[in-house]
Image: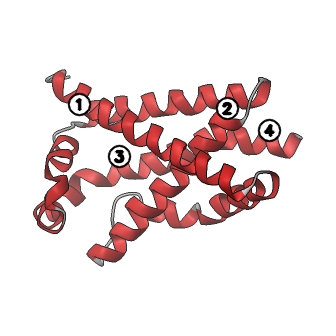
């Protein structure tokens, strides 16, 4: 059980390491690649524009709000029900692999968050292996869909709210 609790507690730390890389690299990357990104993904132009318009303070607020979600889910996992944390783990793992690693492949260049995504593959593999060992494939798919849905909706809401706040 101690190893499992350590794994729970490490999720917010892993998230922070990953988002710290994004925070440090995204501005320079956007300046160089934004037009290519919108040309290759025209359906996402409004979302990409909203993300691009976030200054470092607003982007940090989004990161901290997501971190709060993770910390609450870890507390729930330790004291009551681990299912919300497992769902967020799945969502974070899928989001990390799809957004960062596949984007790097599509653009054939570095994409913000890609280095930590590659370094986190063993962490994700261990977590996925553990979850597949205690839950059925269907239960894992449901957790993955729910976790990715919560993360995606929350990010969309936070980007929208940050746009409404004006200058911070």
Which quadrant of the figure contains the C terminus?
top left
**Residue indicated by mark 2:** 74
Please tell me the numbered disc located at residue 144: none
Which mark identifies residue 5? 4
Of badges 1 and 3, the one in the foreground is: 1
Left or right: where 149 falls relative to 71: left
First reached walking from the N terminus: tag 1 or tag 3: 3
Decide which of 3, 42 is in the foreground and name it: 42
Write down the quadrant of residue 56 in the picture.
top left
* Percent coordinates x, y for residue 162 in the rendering: 24, 28
- Which is more N-terminal, label 1 or label 2? 2
Q: Residue at x 10, y 63 (%)?
A: 35
The secondary element bearing badge 2 is classed as helix
Residue at 60% across, 42% down: 87
Image x and y of residue 45, in percent? 14, 52
Q: Is residue 148 visible?
A: yes
Drawn side of residue 4 relative to residue 43, left or right: right
- 48 vs 58, nearest the viewer: 48
Query: Is 26 on the left-hand or right-hand side of 52?
Result: right
- Residue 13 visible? The answer is no
Name the side, left or right, on which 61 lies relative to 130.
Answer: left
The mark that comes first in sequence, 4 or 3, is 4
Look at discs 2 and 3 and give the one toward the viewer.
2
Could you tell me how far apart the alpha carbons at marks 2 and 4 are, in whole angstroms? 9 Å
Report helix, strand or loop for mark 1: helix
As drawn, the label of residue 160 is 1
How far, Cα to Cα, is label 4 from label 3? 28 Å
| Residue beneath disc 3 | 23
The image shows residue 143, relative to residue 136, as above or below, that is above
Q: Are marks 2 and 3 in contact (CB under 8 Å)?
A: no
């Amino acid at each position: 059980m101690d190893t499992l609790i350590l794994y729970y507690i490490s999720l917010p730390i892993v998230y922070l390491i990953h988002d710290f890389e994004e925070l440090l690299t995204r501005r320079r990357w956007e300046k160089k690649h934004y037009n290519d990104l919108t040309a290759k993904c025209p359906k996402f132009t409004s979302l990409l524009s909203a993300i691009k318009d976030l200054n470092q303070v607003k982007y940090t607020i989004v990161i901290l709000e997501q971190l709060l979600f993770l910390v609450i889910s870890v507390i729930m996992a330790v004291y009551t029900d681990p299912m919300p944390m497992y769902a967020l783990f799945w969502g974070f793992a899928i989001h990390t692999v799809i957004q960062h690693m596949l984007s790097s492949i599509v653009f054939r260049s570095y994409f913000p968050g890609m280095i930590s995504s590659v370094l986190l593959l063993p962490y994700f593999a261990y977590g996925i292996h553990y979850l597949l060992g205690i839950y059925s494939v269907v239960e894992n798919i449901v957790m993955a869909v729910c976790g990715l849905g919560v993360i995606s909706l929350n990010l969309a809401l936070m980007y929208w709210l940050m746009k409404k706040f004006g200058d911070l």
